Image (cartoon, rainbow, N blue to C red):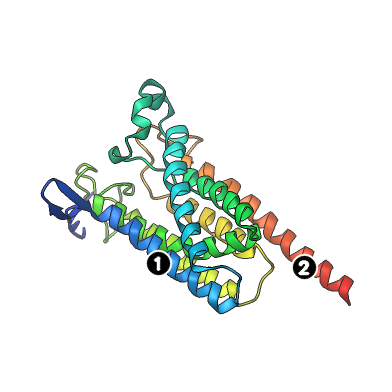
Amino acid sequence: MTLLHAIPYPNISPVFLELGPLQFRWYGLMYLIGLAGAYFLIMRRVESKGLSMTKDQVYNMVVWAAFGVFIGGRLGYTLFYNFSYYVQHPASIVAVWEGGMSFHGGLLGVIVALFWFSQRQGIPAYQIADLAAAATPIGLGFGRLGNFINGELYGRATDVDWCMVFPSGGPACRHPSQLYEAGLEGVFLFTLLWVIAKTIPPSGTIFWSFITGYGVCRMIVEFVREPDAQLGFILGSFSMGQLLSLPMVVVGIFMLVLGYQRRTLIQAKSQ
Protein backbone atom coordinates (compact mmCIF):
# COMPACT_ATOMS: atom_id res chain seq x y z
CA MET A 1 0.00 0.00 0.00
CA THR A 2 1.59 3.28 -1.09
CA LEU A 3 1.69 6.33 1.16
CA LEU A 4 2.59 8.82 -1.58
CA HIS A 5 -0.77 10.56 -1.38
CA ALA A 6 -1.33 10.28 2.36
CA ILE A 7 -2.28 13.41 4.29
CA PRO A 8 0.06 13.97 7.25
CA TYR A 9 -1.67 13.49 10.59
CA PRO A 10 -1.44 16.87 12.39
CA ASN A 11 -0.22 15.29 15.65
CA ILE A 12 -1.86 17.88 17.89
CA SER A 13 -1.01 17.51 21.56
CA PRO A 14 -4.07 16.22 23.46
CA VAL A 15 -3.21 18.77 26.18
CA PHE A 16 -3.92 22.37 25.18
CA LEU A 17 -3.02 24.00 28.52
CA GLU A 18 -0.86 23.07 31.49
CA LEU A 19 -0.96 24.94 34.80
CA GLY A 20 1.52 23.29 37.10
CA PRO A 21 0.28 19.74 37.76
CA LEU A 22 -3.04 20.47 36.05
CA GLN A 23 -3.58 19.42 32.43
CA PHE A 24 -6.49 20.63 30.31
CA ARG A 25 -7.22 18.37 27.37
CA TRP A 26 -8.86 19.05 24.05
CA TYR A 27 -11.23 16.13 24.51
CA GLY A 28 -12.63 17.55 27.72
CA LEU A 29 -12.88 20.98 26.11
CA MET A 30 -14.91 19.48 23.26
CA TYR A 31 -17.39 18.08 25.79
CA LEU A 32 -17.70 21.50 27.43
CA ILE A 33 -18.25 23.20 24.06
CA GLY A 34 -20.89 20.62 23.18
CA LEU A 35 -22.73 21.09 26.48
CA ALA A 36 -22.54 24.90 26.26
CA GLY A 37 -23.74 24.83 22.67
CA ALA A 38 -26.61 22.53 23.64
CA TYR A 39 -27.67 24.88 26.45
CA PHE A 40 -27.79 27.96 24.23
CA LEU A 41 -29.57 26.13 21.40
CA ILE A 42 -32.18 24.66 23.74
CA MET A 43 -32.68 28.03 25.39
CA ARG A 44 -33.20 29.65 22.01
CA ARG A 45 -35.76 27.02 20.96
CA VAL A 46 -37.63 27.33 24.24
CA GLU A 47 -37.91 31.10 23.77
CA SER A 48 -38.79 30.96 20.06
CA LYS A 49 -41.51 28.34 20.59
CA GLY A 50 -42.84 29.94 23.75
CA LEU A 51 -42.37 26.80 25.83
CA SER A 52 -42.96 27.01 29.56
CA MET A 53 -39.42 26.32 30.74
CA THR A 54 -37.23 28.63 32.81
CA LYS A 55 -33.50 29.19 32.33
CA ASP A 56 -32.87 27.21 35.51
CA GLN A 57 -34.87 24.28 34.15
CA VAL A 58 -32.91 24.31 30.89
CA TYR A 59 -29.63 24.49 32.81
CA ASN A 60 -30.66 21.61 35.08
CA MET A 61 -31.80 19.62 32.04
CA VAL A 62 -28.33 19.95 30.47
CA VAL A 63 -26.63 19.04 33.76
CA TRP A 64 -28.73 15.88 34.14
CA ALA A 65 -28.05 15.00 30.51
CA ALA A 66 -24.31 15.37 31.16
CA PHE A 67 -24.52 13.00 34.13
CA GLY A 68 -26.45 10.54 31.98
CA VAL A 69 -23.82 10.71 29.23
CA PHE A 70 -20.87 10.06 31.54
CA ILE A 71 -22.44 7.39 33.73
CA GLY A 72 -24.26 5.61 30.91
CA GLY A 73 -21.33 5.95 28.54
CA ARG A 74 -18.93 4.37 30.99
CA LEU A 75 -21.27 1.56 31.99
CA GLY A 76 -22.10 0.96 28.32
CA TYR A 77 -18.44 0.61 27.43
CA THR A 78 -17.97 -1.76 30.36
CA LEU A 79 -20.89 -3.99 29.32
CA PHE A 80 -20.73 -3.80 25.52
CA TYR A 81 -17.05 -3.45 24.69
CA ASN A 82 -14.78 -4.81 27.45
CA PHE A 83 -16.91 -6.78 29.88
CA SER A 84 -14.39 -9.58 30.45
CA TYR A 85 -11.70 -7.09 31.52
CA TYR A 86 -13.89 -5.14 33.93
CA VAL A 87 -15.25 -8.30 35.52
CA GLN A 88 -11.68 -9.08 36.51
CA HIS A 89 -10.82 -5.43 37.35
CA PRO A 90 -14.04 -3.90 38.75
CA ALA A 91 -12.17 -0.98 40.35
CA SER A 92 -11.19 0.19 36.85
CA ILE A 93 -14.83 0.89 35.97
CA VAL A 94 -14.57 4.28 37.67
CA ALA A 95 -11.18 5.04 36.08
CA VAL A 96 -12.67 7.22 33.33
CA TRP A 97 -9.30 8.94 32.78
CA GLU A 98 -8.08 5.70 31.21
CA GLY A 99 -10.61 6.16 28.39
CA GLY A 100 -13.51 4.04 27.25
CA MET A 101 -16.95 5.51 26.61
CA SER A 102 -19.86 4.07 24.63
CA PHE A 103 -22.28 6.30 22.75
CA HIS A 104 -25.08 3.77 22.99
CA GLY A 105 -24.61 3.48 26.75
CA GLY A 106 -24.49 7.27 27.01
CA LEU A 107 -27.71 7.51 25.02
CA LEU A 108 -29.49 5.14 27.39
CA GLY A 109 -28.10 7.11 30.33
CA VAL A 110 -29.42 10.39 28.91
CA ILE A 111 -32.86 8.90 28.20
CA VAL A 112 -33.18 7.66 31.78
CA ALA A 113 -31.87 10.92 33.28
CA LEU A 114 -34.08 13.19 31.17
CA PHE A 115 -37.18 11.04 31.63
CA TRP A 116 -36.68 11.32 35.38
CA PHE A 117 -36.14 15.08 34.96
CA SER A 118 -39.32 15.49 32.89
CA GLN A 119 -41.41 13.59 35.43
CA ARG A 120 -40.02 15.55 38.34
CA GLN A 121 -40.54 18.92 36.61
CA GLY A 122 -43.94 18.04 35.18
CA ILE A 123 -42.78 18.72 31.62
CA PRO A 124 -43.97 16.43 28.77
CA ALA A 125 -41.33 13.78 28.10
CA TYR A 126 -41.40 14.29 24.33
CA GLN A 127 -40.86 18.03 24.75
CA ILE A 128 -37.66 17.33 26.66
CA ALA A 129 -36.65 14.55 24.25
CA ASP A 130 -37.12 16.73 21.16
CA LEU A 131 -35.17 19.63 22.68
CA ALA A 132 -32.30 17.37 23.73
CA ALA A 133 -32.17 15.46 20.43
CA ALA A 134 -31.99 18.64 18.35
CA ALA A 135 -28.94 19.79 20.31
CA THR A 136 -27.11 16.47 20.64
CA PRO A 137 -25.35 16.57 17.22
CA ILE A 138 -23.38 19.57 18.47
CA GLY A 139 -21.75 17.46 21.16
CA LEU A 140 -21.31 14.51 18.82
CA GLY A 141 -19.52 16.61 16.21
CA PHE A 142 -17.12 18.20 18.68
CA GLY A 143 -16.62 14.88 20.47
CA ARG A 144 -15.46 13.22 17.25
CA LEU A 145 -13.02 16.07 16.69
CA GLY A 146 -11.68 15.28 20.16
CA ASN A 147 -11.26 11.63 19.12
CA PHE A 148 -9.33 12.80 16.06
CA ILE A 149 -7.00 15.00 18.14
CA ASN A 150 -6.40 12.06 20.50
CA GLY A 151 -5.61 9.83 17.52
CA GLU A 152 -8.16 7.24 18.67
CA LEU A 153 -11.10 5.44 17.05
CA TYR A 154 -9.38 5.69 13.67
CA GLY A 155 -10.46 3.91 10.51
CA ARG A 156 -9.34 0.79 8.69
CA ALA A 157 -6.30 0.60 6.45
CA THR A 158 -6.92 2.07 3.00
CA ASP A 159 -5.18 3.57 -0.01
CA VAL A 160 -7.48 6.56 -0.54
CA ASP A 161 -5.66 9.85 -1.18
CA TRP A 162 -6.80 11.37 2.12
CA CYS A 163 -5.69 8.50 4.38
CA MET A 164 -3.56 9.22 7.45
CA VAL A 165 -1.02 7.34 9.54
CA PHE A 166 -2.12 7.61 13.15
CA PRO A 167 0.57 7.41 15.87
CA SER A 168 -1.15 4.52 17.68
CA GLY A 169 -2.41 2.81 14.52
CA GLY A 170 0.83 1.26 13.32
CA PRO A 171 2.41 1.96 9.90
CA ALA A 172 -0.85 1.49 7.95
CA CYS A 173 -2.48 4.49 6.29
CA ARG A 174 -6.04 4.68 7.55
CA HIS A 175 -9.42 6.33 6.99
CA PRO A 176 -9.80 9.41 9.25
CA SER A 177 -13.14 7.96 10.30
CA GLN A 178 -13.44 10.37 13.23
CA LEU A 179 -13.80 13.21 10.70
CA TYR A 180 -16.39 11.22 8.74
CA GLU A 181 -18.38 10.82 11.96
CA ALA A 182 -18.00 14.49 12.85
CA GLY A 183 -19.46 15.34 9.44
CA LEU A 184 -22.28 12.79 9.51
CA GLU A 185 -23.24 12.64 13.19
CA GLY A 186 -22.52 16.33 13.73
CA VAL A 187 -23.07 18.58 10.72
CA PHE A 188 -25.38 16.37 8.65
CA LEU A 189 -27.57 15.20 11.54
CA PHE A 190 -27.86 18.70 12.99
CA THR A 191 -28.96 20.05 9.61
CA LEU A 192 -31.42 17.21 9.06
CA LEU A 193 -33.11 17.75 12.42
CA TRP A 194 -33.24 21.50 11.85
CA VAL A 195 -35.00 20.97 8.50
CA ILE A 196 -37.47 18.49 10.04
CA ALA A 197 -38.25 20.91 12.87
CA LYS A 198 -39.26 23.54 10.30
CA THR A 199 -42.09 21.29 9.07
CA ILE A 200 -43.90 21.42 12.45
CA PRO A 201 -43.80 17.63 12.97
CA PRO A 202 -45.71 15.57 15.55
CA SER A 203 -44.38 15.57 19.10
CA GLY A 204 -41.43 13.18 19.43
CA THR A 205 -40.47 13.33 15.75
CA ILE A 206 -37.17 15.15 16.35
CA PHE A 207 -36.17 12.57 18.95
CA TRP A 208 -37.01 9.55 16.82
CA SER A 209 -35.46 11.19 13.75
CA PHE A 210 -32.26 11.57 15.74
CA ILE A 211 -32.39 7.94 16.86
CA THR A 212 -32.91 6.77 13.28
CA GLY A 213 -30.44 9.19 11.72
CA TYR A 214 -27.66 8.42 14.17
CA GLY A 215 -28.16 4.69 13.71
CA VAL A 216 -27.86 5.02 9.92
CA CYS A 217 -24.82 7.33 10.10
CA ARG A 218 -23.01 5.10 12.59
CA MET A 219 -23.69 1.95 10.59
CA ILE A 220 -22.28 3.59 7.45
CA VAL A 221 -19.08 4.81 9.13
CA GLU A 222 -18.51 1.48 10.86
CA PHE A 223 -17.78 -0.04 7.43
CA VAL A 224 -14.51 1.94 7.36
CA ARG A 225 -13.84 2.29 11.10
CA GLU A 226 -11.40 -0.09 12.77
CA PRO A 227 -13.31 -2.36 15.16
CA ASP A 228 -12.24 -2.42 18.79
CA ALA A 229 -9.16 -4.61 19.16
CA GLN A 230 -10.57 -6.61 22.08
CA LEU A 231 -13.76 -7.40 20.15
CA GLY A 232 -13.02 -7.47 16.43
CA PHE A 233 -16.04 -8.28 14.28
CA ILE A 234 -19.05 -9.65 16.14
CA LEU A 235 -21.19 -11.20 13.42
CA GLY A 236 -19.52 -11.77 10.06
CA SER A 237 -18.23 -8.38 8.96
CA PHE A 238 -20.49 -6.48 11.36
CA SER A 239 -19.03 -4.65 14.33
CA MET A 240 -20.49 -4.07 17.78
CA GLY A 241 -21.30 -0.48 16.80
CA GLN A 242 -23.40 -1.68 13.88
CA LEU A 243 -25.23 -4.31 15.92
CA LEU A 244 -26.10 -1.71 18.56
CA SER A 245 -27.18 0.81 15.91
CA LEU A 246 -29.44 -1.51 13.93
CA PRO A 247 -32.21 -1.59 16.59
CA MET A 248 -32.08 2.22 16.68
CA VAL A 249 -32.94 2.36 12.98
CA VAL A 250 -35.72 -0.24 13.19
CA VAL A 251 -37.39 1.20 16.31
CA GLY A 252 -36.86 4.78 15.12
CA ILE A 253 -38.58 4.22 11.78
CA PHE A 254 -41.44 2.38 13.45
CA MET A 255 -42.02 5.20 15.95
CA LEU A 256 -41.82 7.87 13.24
CA VAL A 257 -44.48 6.13 11.15
CA LEU A 258 -46.63 5.61 14.25
CA GLY A 259 -46.36 9.26 15.20
CA TYR A 260 -47.49 10.55 11.82
CA GLN A 261 -50.30 7.97 11.66
CA ARG A 262 -51.57 9.09 15.05
CA ARG A 263 -51.61 12.73 13.98
CA THR A 264 -53.47 11.84 10.78
CA LEU A 265 -56.12 9.94 12.79
CA ILE A 266 -56.50 12.81 15.25
CA GLN A 267 -56.90 15.31 12.41
CA ALA A 268 -59.46 13.06 10.67
CA LYS A 269 -61.53 12.74 13.86
CA SER A 270 -61.53 16.49 14.43
CA GLN A 271 -62.97 17.25 11.00
Report the side of 45 relative to 260 (left or right): left
User: What is the number of the mark on residue 37?
Assistant: 1
Residue found 66% across the figure and 71% down from its top: 201
As helix, strand or loop, the secondary structure at mark 2 comes to helix
On the question of residue 164 being in view, the answer is no
User: What is the number of the mark on residue 46?
Assistant: none
Picture layout, residue 27 above or below residue 259: above
Picture layout, residue 230 above or below residue 148: above
Q: Position of residue 267 (x, y in %)?
A: 82, 73
Q: Work out whether residue 258 or residue 61 is closer to the camera in this orientation and state it.
A: 61
Residue found 46% across the figure and 58% down from its top: 62
Q: Quadrant of the C terminus?
A: bottom right
Picture layout, residue 5 above or below residue 116: below
Residue found 29% across the figure and 53% down from its top: 28
Q: CA distance from mark 2 to mark 1?
A: 32 Å
Q: Work out whether residue 68 or residue 166 is closer to the camera in this orientation and state it.
A: 68
Report the side of 197 relative to 139 (left or right): right
Picture layout, residue 48 above or below residue 26: below
Q: Amino acid at mark 2?
A: Arg
Residue tagged by mark 2? 263
Q: Position of residue 16 (x, y in %)?
A: 18, 57
Q: Tell me if mark 1 has few (under 14), some (14-19) or many (20+) residues whose alpha carbon lies within 10 angstroms of its own.
A: some
Report the side of 153 relative to 250 (left or right): left
